[in-house]
Image: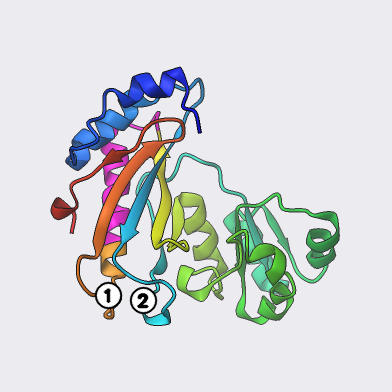
Amino acid sequence: MKKGKRYLEAAKQVDRMTTYETAEAVSLVKKCASAKFDETIEAHIRLGVDGRHADQQVRGAVVLPHGTGKTVRVLVFAKGPKADEALAAGADYVGAEELVPRIQKEGWLDFDVVVATPDMMGVVGRLGRILGPKGLMPNPKAGTVTMDVTKAVKDIKAGKIEYRLDKTNIIHCPIGKVSFTEEMIADNFQTLIEAIIKAKPAAAKGQYLRSVVISSTMGPGVKLNTAKLG
């Protein structure tokens, strides 16, 4: 893929052979972000695990202290008092069976996170083919299958993100916006890294943090010194 002039100019500021300390990396990423919109800053973390094995899966959720800078739309599958609770906590959409045809037939997907009470998982299961590939399926490990819908909704709205391995054993997560201060981005990054280190599977052998790169939406990647992280 041909890179634009702006990207190439920004890339000149990054030494590809160097691994940077967190503060320096964050500063560089902010400096290299030149798009006309408030770019998202993401962390890309390659782990020394094999996600094809169940005992080497890395998945969970963490609340970033400064949020992601994005307004997250939450859909809750719940009934009765739990539905009222979800609405009171600030959920954007709450419903039950009646949402199934809307999602299946009308292709309605105006939400970013799905939460469900355990008794609703039978209903949500019918949407597995649609929600699964989009990473929207509620999961107990991520705290999105729970009776405590108030906490789930409030945490998500406060900046809770889910992290999970992709097929290449890399975790991709947003850690803020270019408009955030360097301290806010570094705080969020540190919180994410600590959660991932804590989630290290017992079956993981050798170096766990293989490589860590942070970048803005349109900017070049900046490598971090993994020895200083774990």
Q: Position of residue 94 (x, y in %)?
A: 71, 61
- Whether residue 1 sits left or right of residue 173 in the image: it is right
Q: Are marks 1 and 2 in contact (CB under 8 Å)?
A: yes
- Whether residue 96 sits left or right of residue 21 in the image: it is right
- Whether residue 41 sits left or right of residue 48 in the image: it is right
- Whether residue 94 sits left or right of residue 53 in the image: it is right
Q: In this orientation, which residue lies closer to the viewer: 5 or 56?
A: 5
The quarter of the displayed image where residue 224 is located: top left
> What colour scheme governs how the chains and residues are painted in the rendered image of this protein?
rainbow
Q: Position of residue 121 (x, y in %)?
A: 66, 78
Residue for badge 1: 204
Residue for badge 2: 56
Q: How many labels sit on residues? A: 2
The quarter of the displayed image where residue 137 is located: bottom right
Identified at 51% across, 64% down, the residue is 152
Which SS does the magenta portion mostly show? helix
Which residues fall within the magenta stretch?
A: 178-195
